[in-house]
Amino acid sequence: MMCTIILNRLLQLIPVMVGISLITFAVISLSPGDPAEITLRATLGTESPPKEAVAKLHEEMGLDDPWHVSYLKWTSRVVQGDLGYSYQTKRSTIEEITHALPITFELAFLSMFFSAAVAIPLGITAALRQNGPVDHLCRLTSIISLSSPEFFVAIVFMLLGGVYLGILPVAGTGGIEYFILPALTLSVGLTAITMRIMRTSMIETLEQDYIRTARAKGLSYRKVIWRHALKNALLPVLIYMGTQLGWIFGGAVTIESIFALPGLGRLLVNSVSSMDIMVVQGCMLTFAVIIVLINLGVDLAHLYLDPSIRGQGE
Amino acid sequence: MKRKEGFLLILLALMVMGAGCTDQEQKEELQTLSVSCQWSLNTIDPHQTGFIPQRLGYVETLVGVDYEGKITPSLAKSWEVSDDGKNWTFVLRDDVLFHDGTPFTAGTMKTSLERSFALSESVFGKIPVSAIKAPDNLTLEISLDSPFPALPAYLSRGESAALAPGSYDADGNVVKPIGTGPFIFESWKPEEEIVIVKNPDYWGQSASVDKVIYRIMPEALTRKMLLDSKEIQIAMILSPEIAEEYTEKTDYSVLQQPIARVRMIGFNIEKEPFDDQRVRQAVNYAIDREAIVTYVLHGYGTTAAGLFPPGFYWANQEIAPYTYNTEKAQALLEEAGWTDTDGDGTLDKDGKPLKITLVTYPERAELPEIAEVIQQQLKKVGIKTELKVLNFDAAESLRNQGEFDIFLVGRGLLFVPDPDEIMMTDYHSNGTSIDGLGAYRWHNDRVDELLEEARTTSDMAVRKKLYDEAQAIIVEEAPVAYLNYYVNIDVTTSDIEGYRLHPTEYSLHLENVSIV
């Protein structure tokens, strides 16, 4: 049963991927700059590749064909992992992306970790002591942190950690310490929402019949929370955090520029501002694929963790 | 057991502390300078991207550029050109070694230059070069198909740097740039940093610091934070707002330098009202240049009289600036027939009000603000201005179609440190009659003549005279109005000595910098 559902989900991906590829292809086709010339400049190591060579590659890449033929040729190149070359660095787009991707992943997972570590305990505490001081404080901080733009939060963290305390590097790359401030910055908005969701979910769970039953049969409050309530209350929070991973990748675009991390977000900003079209297409596709895969992963995890959904599938 | 563990822990702590101490001592022996800028290096090959290698000083070119924007000897001691202007002979220094110890000769320079010309055609494509020869170890001859007096200026571009044969791999790609400069290239991490170390065998003045780390930080604010946390000693290219914070602080110094980039307005001289020279001059008098610098640019700008900033060799220092004078402006407008007959505050002539359109673009953030100030200032003399702020491409195409009265633009002047290029494209009738950003459809026979004559000689003093006259005519006839020059602002910690900004951004000259 599980297999058919997974298969179903995978099949649903096909139209999504086709849509993404069409959009990316359109962006590339409408941008100025000749992909054939860019490729030859990079591979031949000369600034003005011979006209005949450009014309030949034009034909091979199908740049002068009608758009659907051109699109099919482009897709087959992309599927084979040929994403062209950066006209700026003369390196292949794949090379650029494999260099940048681990940095963005490290940033994303670290900020997920920070937000989970802060939001889940606080959310639970707020739920258990509704309208207590912790609850009020959490509500206040989540409103403040949700309404502060990332750029501002980044500066506050830089000032605190890097300038006043002087314990963390302000910006740049190196060991894990360089990721702490940017990951904290990214986690702020996420923490605020996760905390609220954790609280609501916990409150809802505590009102369920089975909790009352557990209490009635004489289990201690502590045991009920840990053994029965938490597991069920965590599920929506985990699902939410999964989908937010994509949001974090989006946030990386600003954060990586401010903290000078050479990740995927900065690569995208750089390539867009210099009209490095082959890299732009590579970044767009990578971002899209990552977000699609994350959503798929979340769906599957949901399926695994929540048997009631599986029941619906049947 | 417990006691043993505690003892071990103390031992471990001592060891860590000990290690920390030796680290500290080593750092004190080795002087490291950290600087930060937004410009990142795209390729390790200086022949493709040369400006950062050159600014950092790990490569050098045949000729240099001094603080007046004048061409000076560097790897070439001297040079001369044949009477027909087609054969250039450069005499090279005999005391130069590459960083790997190989001697610098005319032969290596020839190979290096040929590679530069092939790889950076967008920079050197204009040079009508026919052959490069190295008759002996210290003589380099460049033959041209036609005279080209700006040749030395082009050869000051970092892309023409001398690279040792050991810089390339078997396929001819640069694996490690081995140059001749005061610093030796050590490592590069794309989008992160470049590390260079002192060259103890430099032919000129040796560097005072042992190591320089050039950190790439795209945001000015990040560079400011790094400076505040003392992670760097020099933060380059900051905004006026950021720089203002440091002017009061004693442990920092703020440096500013006008660079070869002017903000100016071009008039549409093909239609009323700016077909009349008096109206163009009136606008020149009606604009309060000081106010723009003070209020829009926070004081970080220099008001402009002519095309080039006054510190430049090529600037005509005699040009009298148009000073703010609304009475003069009104008198000129009246002379041209524009008076306020209906008393509505806007001048008119033959029943038509004096309404103009100012086109500019927001990519340079200060331009729309300046446009608003100009709008207010022109209103005071009775000119009604409509602002059109469009993205650069759209603004440029409006300009090229003549759909404007005034075009406000920031214009780079010295792509190479020689006035030929900018004068020919922006003020010679060949350049003004086609699309561009200079004087719009303006034509002056005398200026054409002067600019052409300046191309036939390589004598700097003679050329300067010709360009001076041309600049004076341009200011007098006013097809454009110069407003102010761009200013680069760097902030250093106060223990930095000898750091100076270069007006053409040719070099940081970090070899002159010391940490006290």
Image (spheres, coloured by chain):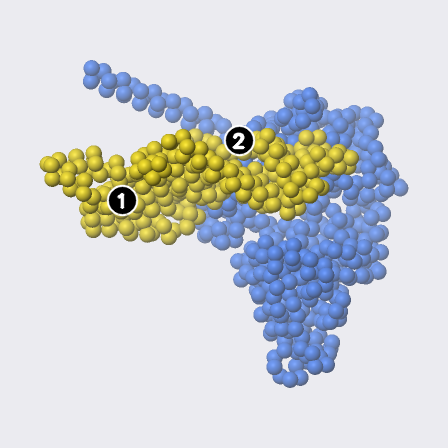
Q: Secondary structure at mark 1?
A: helix
Q: Position of residue B122 (x, y in %)?
A: 72, 41
Dividing the picture into quadrants, the one containing residue A306 is top left
Does B447 sit above or below residue A205? below
Horizontal side of A74 relative to B269 (left or right) equals left
Work out whether residue B116 can be spotted.
no
Query: Pointer 1: what residue?
Result: A201
Q: Please give the count of numbered marks on the rendered protein.
A: 2
Q: Secondary structure at mark 2?
A: helix
| Crowd tier of the residue under label 1, counting other residues whose Cα lies within 10 Å: few below 14, some 14–19, many 20 or above | many
Work out whether residue B350 can be spotted.
yes
Dividing the picture into quadrants, the one containing residue A307 is top left
Give whichever of A146, B445 is nearer the camera.
Answer: A146
Residue at the spot x=68%, y=60% of the render?
Answer: B398
Q: Position of residue B421 (x, y in %)?
A: 75, 49
Does B396 sit above or below residue B375? above
In which quadrant of the rendered image does the C terminus of chain A lie? Answer: top left
Tell me the kind of residue under disc 1: Ser
